[in-house]
Image (cartoon, grey):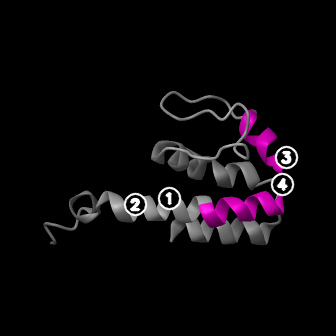
Amino acid sequence: NWPSSDPANFLLPEPLHHWYQKFWDHDDQWCKNALSTQELDFCYSVLHPIVGMCHFKDGITILKQVTGQAQRDMQCYMIAVIGGAASLGIVIAVCALMDF
């Protein structure tokens, strides 16, 4: 019953940028600490390329600046990448923070 409740109507690019930046600054760094950087890069590099999604053939730890789409794609892959390698508590924490 809320005609303007569609997030596309009220979310501006600035808050979206800050949320993606939070992932890059915190969640990604925690995953790098939970797994070794070599293991995280390997897991990203062996993912099957999907049309319309970024493919990180060399991993993500070498990246310095990324676009919003690349950050979004990293977020989409992150739980699948750390799922079998990190402890269950870390996977749950990162998943909860990404849902927040």
| Residue occupying image coordinates x 37% and y 65% | 15
Q: Quadrant of the N terminus?
A: bottom left
Residue at the front extreme, as displayed: 64
Residue wearing tag 4: 85
Label 4: element kind? loop
Mark 1 vs 2: CB contact within 8 A: yes
Helix or strand or loop: what does disc 3 sit on? helix
Q: Earlier in the sequence, mark 2 or mark 3?
A: 2
Gap in angstroms between the C-alphas marked 4 and 1: 23 Å
Residue type, label 4: Ala
**Which residue is label 1 attached to?**
20
Q: Is residue 97 left or right of residue 18?
A: right
x, y percentage for residue 83?
75, 55
Viewer-proximal residue among 90 and 17: 17
Q: Amino acid at mark 2?
A: Leu
Query: Mark 1: which secondary structure?
Result: helix
Q: Is label 3 or label 4 in front?
A: 3
Disc 1 vs disc 3: which is toward the camera?
A: 1
**Residue bearing the label numbered 2:** 16
Give the residue at mark 3.
39
